[in-house]
Structures are given as C-alpha cells and as structure tokens.
Image (spheres, rainbow, N blue to C red):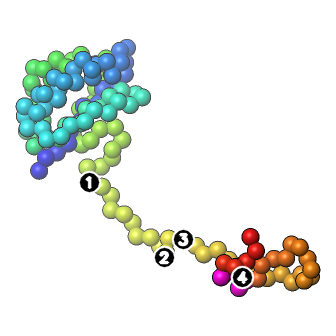
Amino acid sequence: MAEWFAIEVLDGPGSARAWADAHGDALVQAGFGLGATDWGWHHLPWGSVLELELPDEAAFERFRDLPAVVAALEAVPDPLHGLLVHRGRGGSSGSRRPRRPLPMAGAGSAALPIPEQREQDEGSEDRQPTRRAILSGSGPR
C-alpha cells in the first residue's frame, strides 16, 4: 500500500518558494524514479510543502539518500529550524486515518416554538397571523 511522505520547508533568510522553484523538479523526478504514484506542491504563507506518495517507507529512505535530494535538503533557506521531513501529508493535514463521524444526537437540530395567537381588534392593521395560517404557510407577508 502506498504511503504519503512530506518535506516541509519554512521561510528563513530566503524564500521557501524560491527554494521550491530551484529544487522542485529534481525532487519530483527523484521521487518518480523510485516509484512515486502522486505528488503535490503546496505554497503557504509560512513556506512550501512537497507531498510524495511512494510505495513504502523503504522507498522513502532510498529517496532521502539520493544525491539530488541530499543537496536540495542542505540548501533550504533555514537549515537549522526550517526543514521538516515526515511520514504523512504535510501542513495541517492531521492524522493518516480520517476520524469517523460522530452520530448526531436526535435529528441534529432543535424545533422552534410556534408563536401563540394574540387577540386583537378585527380592524387593526398589524394583526398577527393565526397559528393555523403559520403552519399552512398562508399567513400575511
């Protein structure tokens, strides 16, 4: 089963976007050489993320050991604090397995109370609609 791996590069003295433009083609080509089935770049306000779908973790270890990949990772804008390499999708994607949806309590909503009919003069202009008119949708508009 194929697994996703991510390389996140944070902005530093230089731009992560410029780093991605300079080294992105070499990284993607290296990934496809090792059997990558999908990939994607995400450019975010804080940096850039490369996501690769490789056959297994061994393929990712071989990917990381390629000279082109080592050179690209050494050239990140902030080599001390600006590089994250991990399993899973990048950014704030969360868990590898999606959470199961929780069941809704009841119907998932609360009923609104129906306004009670007020007694007013028959000739009054601001006469309130009756309860039956509200339910049937034939009240004044």
- Checking the image for residue 133, the label placed there is 4
Left or right of 67? Residue 6 is right
What kind of residue is marked 2? Gly
Q: Position of residue 67 (x, y in %)?
A: 10, 20
> Do callouts 3 and 1 mark residues in contact (Cβ within 8 Å)?
no
Tell me which corner region of the image, top left, top right, bottom left or bottom right, holds residue 120: bottom right
Q: Report if residue 107 lies within the magenta region.
A: no
Q: Position of residue 53 (x, y in %)?
A: 17, 41
Q: Which of marks 4 and 1 is nearer the N terminus?
A: 1
Q: Report if residue 132 lies within the magenta region.
A: yes
Q: Which of marks 3 and 1 is nearer the N terminus?
A: 1
- Checking the image for residue 97, the label placed there is 1
What kind of residue is marked 4? Ala
Q: What's the residue at 40%, 28% (across, down)?
A: 46
- Name the foreground residue: 69 vs 35: 35
Q: Which span of residues is magenta-colored?
A: 131-136
What kind of residue is marked 3? Ser
Q: Overall secondary structure of the magenta stretch? A: helix
- C-alpha distance separating marks 2 and 3: 8 Å
- Checking the image for residue 109, the label placed there is 3
Residue that badge 2 annotates: 106
Q: What's the residue at 85%, 76% (across, down)?
A: 127
> Do callouts 4 and 2 mark residues in contact (Cβ within 8 Å)?
no
- Name the foreground residue: 61 vs 132: 132
Nearer mark to the viewer, of 4 and 1: 4
